[in-house]
Amino acid sequence: MARYFLTAYRSPAVSLVHPFFGETIMAKTSVHLDFKTAFKMEPDPKEALVFKIRPRKGISASDAVRTMRRITLAEQLVTTMSAGGRIKILAEGDSWVNLLWPESSALGYEMTFVNALAKDMAKYDTLNIGFPGDTFAEITKNPPQYKQPISGGQRQFFIFSGGGNDFLGGGSLVKYVKRFSQGGGSSNPRDYIKDNEFKAILNRLKIGYRQMVRNVDVWSSGYTHVLLQGYDYAHPRNNGPWLGKPFKALGYAWDSNIAKEIVKYSVDRFYEMLGGVADSSAKVHLVDARNCCQGNWHDELHPNEKASKKIAKKFDAAIDQILAVS
């Protein structure tokens, strides 16, 4: 996590779920800096769905840390100190879960589907510990940050999003996608995939997901339901950092049908893998976010607000269905 400035300064999970400790942190770290003033937040072209978040010139490290702590703790404190009786959700993962919104809206970023769910505060008590600078390896490293807040059956639902940085563009694309010239002009996306390499990527992700499911089952004493999603059919953009440029480097036209079909094929394979994980336990549920973003993308990989709300409705419906039969 030290690869990204400030990621190492993320508050430990215990601080996010202990209101008194949280109040102390807030009091000690309150500074008059907003997100836009304190930070630059830019896509990392090497890692899909990952952002580099760095303090702006002239912002001291201590002020940057204080500001980030205030931002990442503020929403959690609202939920953990509020009245009970609501459905308790823990969300962990990449930038599909958390884009540091609403603070990041000053830089043009939009809400995630978890933000959309959390806005229904009459129904949901949502603790979001995701971070847009995290890769799948960092999210699932041992011990994972979600251990403490999931332990003892504190949360009925655990929303998890991760793995996109391993296959959905960025530096990962070249690992399993052939050069355009090697596809023989085929219209079948499978002919452009290095199958063994892609299988290895999916198998590594499957191992991480299955370990996460086991962890949640043990730490929550079988209480918590896990909700997964596998992204949507992302569309490359001209000079886009995660898809457009990597495809161009491999000899593809960024707006070609075959580039879009390769992304679609990759996402579908990822969903197949997640489906196998979901089938392994009655406590694991796969929410299909495919085709929710049609024309409603903030950038190459992230939904805009309209699409995020549509995805949130799918999660809301899944939660209602689970509770109806529980």
Image (tube, rainbow, N blue to C red):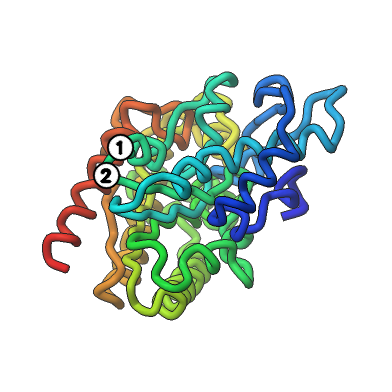
Mark 1: which secondary structure?
loop
Q: Nearer the viewer, residue 33 or 318?
A: 33
Which circle marks residue 323 in the picture? none
Quadrant of the frame with the N terminus: bottom right
Instruction: Please state which amino acid type lies under the numbered disc 1.
Output: Asp
User: At 43% across and 55% down in the image, what residue appears?
Assistant: 90
Question: Residue at left 34%, top 52%?
Answer: 84
Between 294 and 11, which is closer to the camera in this rendering?
Answer: 11
State which quadrant residue 89 falls in: bottom left
- Given the image, on which type of amino acid does mark 2 rest? Lys
Residue 273 in the figure: left or right of residue 66: left
Q: Quadrant of residue 5?
A: top right
| C-alpha gap between disc 1 and disc 2 | 6 Å
Q: Total marks drawn? A: 2
User: Whole-percent x and y of residue 73?
Assistant: 59, 43
Position of the C terminus, as image quadrant, is bottom left
Residue holding disc 1: 120
**Label 1 close to label 2 by CB (< 8 Å):** yes
Q: Residues within 10 Å of mark 2 (few under 14, many from 20)?
A: some
Could you tell me which secondary element the residue under label 2 belongs to? loop
Residue ID for mark 2: 123
Measuring from the top left, give residue 12's x and y in whole percent: 65, 57
Q: Identify the residue shown where x is 56% and y is 58%.
A: 136
Residue 206 visible somewhere in the drawing: no
**Residue at the image position 37 percent from the left and 40 percent from the top:** 118
Eyeballing the image, is 40 above or below 139? above
Image coords of residue 25 (percent x, y)? 69, 45
Point out the residue furthest to the left here.
Answer: 325
Q: On the picture, is 18 further left or further right than 27?
A: left
